[in-house]
Amino acid sequence: MSDCDCNSKEDKKWHLEKKVTIGHLFTTVTVAVGVLMYMGKIETTLSLHTFQINHLEFERQESDKKIESQFNKIESFLTRIEDKLDRKVDKANRQ
C-alpha cells in the first residue's frame, strides 16, 4: 500500500525540535513589532479621545452658563412686562 505505517506508536508521539529557525525569529519579531505599534496607536487614539472629551465637557459647561444667563435675562424681561401690565390693569381699574 504505502511506505508509511501510520499506526505505529513512534508516529503518534509529539516531536519538538530544539533549534530555532531564522524564519521563526523573523516572524516572532515582526509580530512583536506589530503588536507594539498597534498598542502605541491605541494609546495615541485614547489620548486624543480623552482630550476631545475634556474639550467637549468644557464647551458644554460654557454653553450651560450662557443658556442660564439668557434664561435669567428672559425671566427678568418677563417680570418687567408683568409688572407693567399689572400697573396698567390697576390704573384701568381705578378709573
Image (spheres, helix red, strand yellow):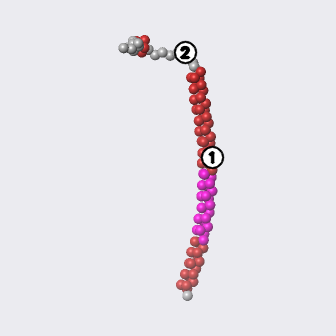
Residue lying at the far bottom of the rendered structure = 95
Instruction: Name the residue tied to disc 1.
Output: 51
The relative height of residue 91 versus residue 44 in the rendered view (above or below) is below
Which of discs 1 and 2 lies nearer the camera? The answer is: 2
**Residue 35 placement (x, y as % from top left):** 58, 32
Q: Looking at the rendering, in which quadrant would you find the C terminus?
A: bottom right
Looking at the image, which is closer to me, 93 or 68?
68
Say what amino acid the circle numbered 2 marks.
Lys
Say what amino acid the circle numbered 1 marks.
Phe
Q: CA distance from mark 1 to mark 2?
A: 49 Å
**Residue 66 placement (x, y as % from top left):** 62, 61
- Residue occupying image coordinates x 42% and y 15%: 12
**Residue 21 placement (x, y as % from top left):** 57, 19
Looking at the image, which is closer to me, 51 or 34?
34
Can residue 68 be found in the magenta stretch? yes
Residue lying at the far front of the rendered structure = 1
Secondary structure beneath dot 1 equals: helix
Crowd tier of the residue under label 1, counting other residues whose Cα lies within 10 Å: few below 14, some 14–19, many 20 or above: few
Residue segment shown in magenta? 56-77
The quarter holding residue 30 reads: top right
- Residue occupying image coordinates x 61% and y 30%: 33
Looking at the image, which is closer to me, 57 or 86?
57
- How many marks the image carries: the answer is 2
Crowd tier of the residue under label 2, counting other residues whose Cα lies within 10 Å: few below 14, some 14–19, many 20 or above: few
Contact, mark 1 vs mark 2 (Cβ under 8 Å): no
- Per the rendering, the mark at residue 63 is none
- Residue occupying image coordinates x 56% and y 75%: 82
**Residue 10 placement (x, y as % from top left):** 43, 11
Instruction: Name the residue tied to disc 2.
Output: 18
Q: Main secondary structure of the magenta part?
A: helix
Secondary structure beneath dot 2 equals: loop
